[in-house]
Amino acid sequence: MLRLAWRRSASKHSPAGPTCVLTAAYSGAYRPQQKSQVDFRCFRQIPHPPSDRSPLLHPRAACYLSPSVFMSMASGSEGPSSTSHRHTNRLAKERSPYLLQHAHNPVDWYPWGKDAFDKAKTEDKPIFLSVGYSTCHWCHVMERESFEDEEIGKILSENFVCIKLDREERPDVDKVYMTFVQATSGGGGWPMSVWLTPELRPFIGGTYFPPRDRGGRPGFKTVLTRIIDQWQNNRPALESSGERIIEALKKGTTITANAGQSPPLAPDVANRCFQQLAHSYEEEYGGFRDAPKFPSPVNLMFLMSYWTVNRSTSEGVEALQMALHTLRMMALGGIHDHIAQGFHRYSTDSSWHVPHFEKMLYDQAQLAVAYITASQVSGEQFFAEVAKDVLLYVSRDLSDKSGGFYSAEDADSVPALGGPEKREGAFCVWTASEVRELLPDVVVGAAGIATLADIFMHHYGVKEQGNVAPEQDPHGELQGQNVLIVRYSVELTAARFGITVEKVNELLASARAKMAEVRKSRPRPHLDTKMLASWNGLMLSAYARVGAVLGDKDLVERAVKAGGFLKEHLWDAKRQTILRSCYRGDQMEVQQISPSISGFLDDYAFIICGLLDLYEATLQTEWLQWAEELQLRQDVLFWDDQGGGYFCSDPTDSTVLLQLKEDQDGAEPSANSVSAFNLLRLSHYTGRQEWLQKSQQLLTAFSDRLTTVPIALPEMVRALLAQHYTLKQIVICGQRDAPDTTSLLAAVNSLFLPYKVLMLADGNTESFLCQRLPVLSSMSQLRGVATAYVCQDFTCSLPVTEPQELRRLLLDGTTDTEIE
């Protein structure tokens, strides 16, 4: 009986972990446990498996790699492929960058779809499903080592129906089989390798495999040989156990509201969430564990929202300090690209110094919002500058001319000095000699005849022998290199060299500009030009919110362009369906695949949130109308009438075996968390009480999770707080672009008001808002000038016309006189 001793789960205490997890579905009794889906991005620099999972929720590692294992895998080339190919498979017809990376493997790859399913049934073969994404380092490694191997390719093609899947295109399929791998092994990651029956039921799952046996551990070829043998000689056991596990997972992953149940008490849940975050908080550098450290914007947004309703308590003050300190240390650290802007995926150390250099669109979007929020609550320009810095990077490097946004930049690239092998961070790091050669000018007036290089190297921690510790560089790829990190304040650097703070700022800006020019000449990392609806929705929110707070018309206009892109290229008006993705064509045109991929819950939820933010930034009701339309469609497609809450994908799709509800705010917020907030906001904009009730039902469905481990759902806790405190309706009566209206709007946008909706009443009783909310027709300007009303629980303040008076009203929360 194949029990597969290959299943080796490693904890952080293991002296040497496995290079893979392989689990036979029938290898023993299975006790279902509810597991949240986690974004275990593939990892590289460190002998720990990073995840965005909250510190209380760590599973055992599926792909735990010791330093020696890392070193042994550093060989090989990921350089540009030859223009002539020995092999071309059907993935060459796809548009996903990840699938195209495998189009010339000697493997008979199929994309996920009917052709592959029919072939498996007709030929009665098991399916090998390989899942990854285009900027995943270990996906590249497994391709180079195994999928480009002629012998392994022949074994795969002759004995399996081989399917390659981009997890970013099909998150629904990825979640099902990752749930299986996590449930049967205790961990997961990418690349994910799963073997299925022709009916798509998994029976063995794992992650990365080396090509050949190594150190007593089976290589990929051995794994394939053993699975072939078991399929031929022990197939009934494989199939029946796979069936049992899927049935157990269906029960174990169910999230539902019990009859008569209500959402948990918001203040209690919020306090528990704060305490759990405080327990995992790392005081010296911020963040929520020692290493690796992820930005975790959902945690930071919760802490700042928690502060707004607990300003006078020690807990509220501590929450704000935790958020601001974390954001400050991240901005000063090497996770922040000081030369070309934006943030890398995560830090491999506790001080935010040495990152995994991949840059993801969803990180940029959420961090831009977190930083502009920090500027609102602190009044510090520093945080606003970082928010603008992030959007500068996205506008320059991740923007399509159509208005859409690309998905990611890879961590690896060919070094500037050449060579066939791509290296982690090659595009971003510097030697001391490079800096000295680039910045040789003597700074007039500086102490000790200092050069611009001396000042820059002091400020950014550049060392002659490199500033990356060996334990942070198990590959040896960063030896002698420097990852820029702010080591001293501008004031201390000015004092060290005897010059003014203004002069230091000027010199550092000049140095960064020169280094940015040099960066442009280096070979660039791979750019994933896939444009995803959900991530574009997050980015839409970022431009709208930062633009509104700063009063920056260019940023708001970029948000409008993004909204237009979504409607033109990712909305099928005839089918009333959001499309998951579109692609940059060879002539820089926007392309769609056929058949197109219909959108998932996160596509609807994130776009709706973005449209609501865009309305508040522009006060153009066309965006509000589309948000209402999309919410109605989301309800039809994904709402669970029996249990409450939304399924992640269309429950009528028979090829998706599990109907899951995301119960984790991780690298991205859960679509249910965002939807809970969307429903509240829309109920106040449209007067639809059923959406208020749906929000309550959704929160009730997640009651157990919210009550026991609210740290898993900090974004949903924010929605629960909004439900508890009731949203304020801020109504500005005036003409949209008039100066007096703009002044009142600036007063509103200067404050972080997480539990509010903002709307404009321009006197047009036929407008969308007046039709939905007739009470707006009774609100008018005082003495012909723009006037603000602040309403809550059907009670409105007396109208105010002065921005400072409005600001004071919003901060105090009460007025001397109120009207019904």
Image: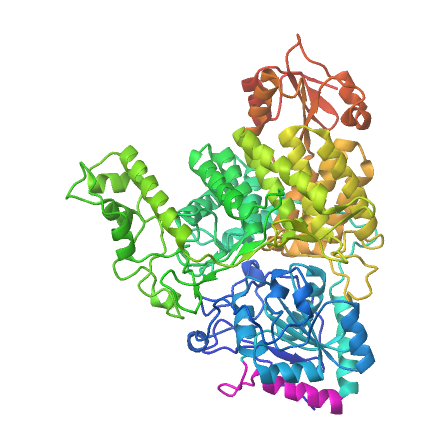
Q: Is residue 274 visible?
A: no
Asked if residue 640 is among those painted magenta in the image, a careful observer would answer no
User: In the displayed structure, would residue 718 be above or below residue 651?
Assistant: above
Q: In this view, does 633 lie to the left or right of 474?
A: right
User: In the displayed structure, would residue 246 be above or below residue 578?
Assistant: below
| Residue 97 drawn at (x, y percent) | 61, 61
User: In the displayed structure, would residue 97 be above or below residue 362?
Assistant: below
- Specify how the rendered protein is coloured: rainbow
User: In the displayed structure, would residue 395 be above or below residue 524?
Assistant: above
The residue most toward the left is 448
Q: Is residue 240 visible?
A: yes
For residue 494, what is the image quadrant? top left
Question: Which residues lie in the magenta part?
Answer: 211-234
Work out whether residue 531 or residue 366 is closer to the camera in this orientation and state it. Answer: 531
Asked if residue 228 is among those painted magenta in the image, a careful observer would answer yes
Q: In this view, does 757 lie to the left or right of 70?
A: right
Question: Residue at position x 79%, y 54% from top?
Answer: 257
Question: Residue at position x 55%, y 74% from top?
Answer: 142
Question: Residue at position x 62%, y 78% from top?
Answer: 106
| Residue 26 drawn at (x, y percent) | 72, 82
Locate the N terminus by quadrant. Answer: bottom right
Locate the C terminus by quadrant. Answer: top right
Work out whether residue 294 or residue 378 is closer to the camera in this orientation and state it. Answer: 294
